[in-house]
Amino acid sequence: MDTTQMLKGVLDLAVLAVVRAEDGYGYDVVRRLRGAGLTDVGDASVYGTLRRLYAAGALTSYVVPSDEGPHRKYYGITPQGRASLDLQTKHWHEFAHTMTDLLDLAEAH
């Protein structure tokens, strides 16, 4: 199964979950998503998602100077982002439960 299409549908949720756990800069978020098992996630997709969530008010950002290269732009979750994550999490659990039931029913026949 091509997980790329499924990942596109849940990338906002995944990014919000990662940033809720701890603020992070772009590549750090990519690394943590991959470390969590989303190995097919693309750098450009995550960077675009971070920018879009920031523009929508779900994330805040701040710059941290670096002695070893360019400054890093960190993202943190806002109260609006937490509310969105909570709602999307509820919807995800309902959807996953429905799909599990459907697949179990199909397997039983």
Image (tube, grey):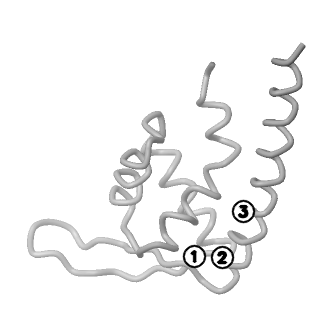
In primary-sequence order, the first of circles 3 and 2 is: 2
Residue neighbourhood size for the residue with mark 2, other residues' Cα within 10 Å, grouped as few (<14), some (14–19), many (≥20): many
Q: Which residue is drawn at 62% across and 67% down?
A: 53
In primary-sequence order, the first of circles 3 and 1 is: 1
Q: Which amino acid does label 3 sit on?
A: Thr
Residue lying at the far front of the rendered structure: 108
Q: Which residue is drawn at 53% across and 62% down?
A: 50
Residue neighbourhood size for the residue with mark 3, other residues' Cα within 10 Å, grouped as few (<14), some (14–19), many (≥20): some
Q: In which quarter of the image is the C terminus?
A: top right
Labelled pair 1, 2 in contact (Cβ < 8 Å): yes
Where residue 24 sits in the image (x, y, percent)?
38, 70
Q: Is residue 57 above or below residue 18?
A: below
Is residue 6 shown left or right of residue 46?
right
In primary-sequence order, the first of circles 1 and 2 is: 1
Is residue 6 shown left or right of residue 102?
left
Where residue 45 sits in the image (x, y, percent)?
53, 45
Is residue 89 shown left or right of residue 27?
right
Q: Which residue is drawn at 65% across and 86% down?
A: 79
Q: Which mark is residue 59?
A: 1
Q: Distance between the residues labelled 1 and 2?
A: 6 Å
Q: How far apart are marks 3 and 1 (CA)?
A: 17 Å
Query: Would you name the residue on which mark 3 appears?
Result: 89
Q: What residue type is labelled 1?
A: Leu
Q: Determine the secondary structure under disc 1.
A: strand
The quadrant where residue 6 appears = top right
Query: Would you name the residue on which mark 2 appears?
Result: 81
